[in-house]
Amino acid sequence: MVRYSTGPFSNEMKKSIPAWVKQGMSIEKIAARIKRTPEGIVKFLEENGFTDEDIPDIPIVIKYQTGRFSKEMKRSIPAWIKQGVTIEEIATRINRSPEGIRKFMDDIGLIDKSMPVLDSDAHSISVALKNKPYWKNLQEQFDDNELQFFEHMWIKMMMEQFRQDLLPAEELQVKQLLTLDIFMNRSAKDRQQQIKEISRTQKDLDQEYKKPKGKRDMARIDYLESRLSYARSAVSNHTTEHTKLLDKMEKIQKDLKATRDQRVKRIEDAKTSFTGLIRALEDEQFRNRMGQEAELMNVAKNNAMEELSDWHEYGKDTDYAEVDVPILNAETVMKHDDI
């Protein structure tokens, strides 16, 4: 929990707060940075000419009830899940956290991994995104499916790849990256439609040419030839556009160091220097793999320690066989007090 300071804002704070807001920083993040309450920051902004539209909303923190689930809850949750009710809706109905509901469902084997579930971190990232100055522009530029894709990928990239550690300029690069991805999807859809149009038009044209020369509709043939030429030209244009967008995306990915080659290079650097290791550990997959290997080593060490702390027969099947404890310390002595 952040402990906020009181008293008037310093001159440095008064200069920094408006600049941070214009850069798209959330009130919550500003409050954490300068250790002042979000409400105090909002009041300062209002006193200095900022309107409600200029000031990002403060995310609402829901305080869920804790404790064991009642019998009624345990009966209702499986029934609601079967009816297609989301975990967030169930959380609202019974005033319990989504994480607690998910754990209960895991325990009884009811969890549906395909469900669109937002944990607390993802929810806070989603709220912060929708408080960005450019979110309204995105709503005007994209349809509902594209907005959903943008939000989904934004959350995944912030949580799994960049760990919410981006400067404002880098954040705009991520926005441009996702925007280009959506434009590429649009171009690919339009290209596919034109390919289908070519197929339909070609069939109609073939039907006309199958007719005897005297019965062919030359006006219709000219029209179909024109449509066919236009569709083929459109396919070519979409291919060119797709290539250009892909080049732009690759450039942004390199600037963000988000390509696989760059991630692999960081992992290779980890083998040569401590600094390289620290950088490599920023990659979640590498970090998880190292954690699993460390835990396996720990388990192997504990098993070996347990085995070597017990009685061991030396020179077995010989005249000089003896029994002893390989590791002799205070713990093994207490374990075998008859030693």
Image: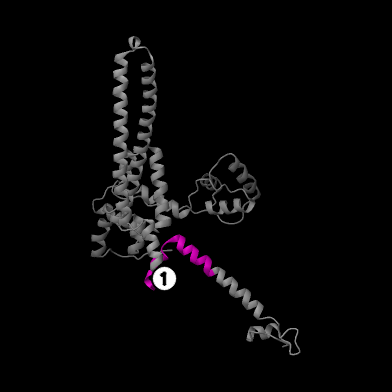
Q: How many marks?
A: 1
Quadrant for residue 162, please give it.
bottom left
Q: Nearer the viewer, residue 230 or 65?
A: 230
In the picture as drawn, the residue positioned furthest to the top comes out as 214
What stretch of residues is rendered in magenta?
A: 272-294
Q: Which residue is mark 1?
A: 271
Measured as percent of width and height from the top left, residue 74 is found at 64, 48
Q: Which quadrant does the C terminus fall into?
A: bottom right
Kind of residue at badge 1: Lys
- The answer to whether residue 35 is magenta is no
> Going 30% across and 50% down the picture, which residue do you hit?
55
Quadrant for residue 241, please give it.
top left
Task: Examine the rendering and report whether any part of residue 205 can be seen.
Answer: yes
Give the overall secondary structure of the magenta segment: helix
> Going 65% across and 46% down the picture, which residue do you hit?
75
> Going 44% across and 52% down the picture, which residue do you hit?
122
Element type at mark 1: loop
Measured as percent of width and height from the top left, residue 230 is found at 29, 28
Q: Which quadrant does the N terminus fall into?
A: bottom left
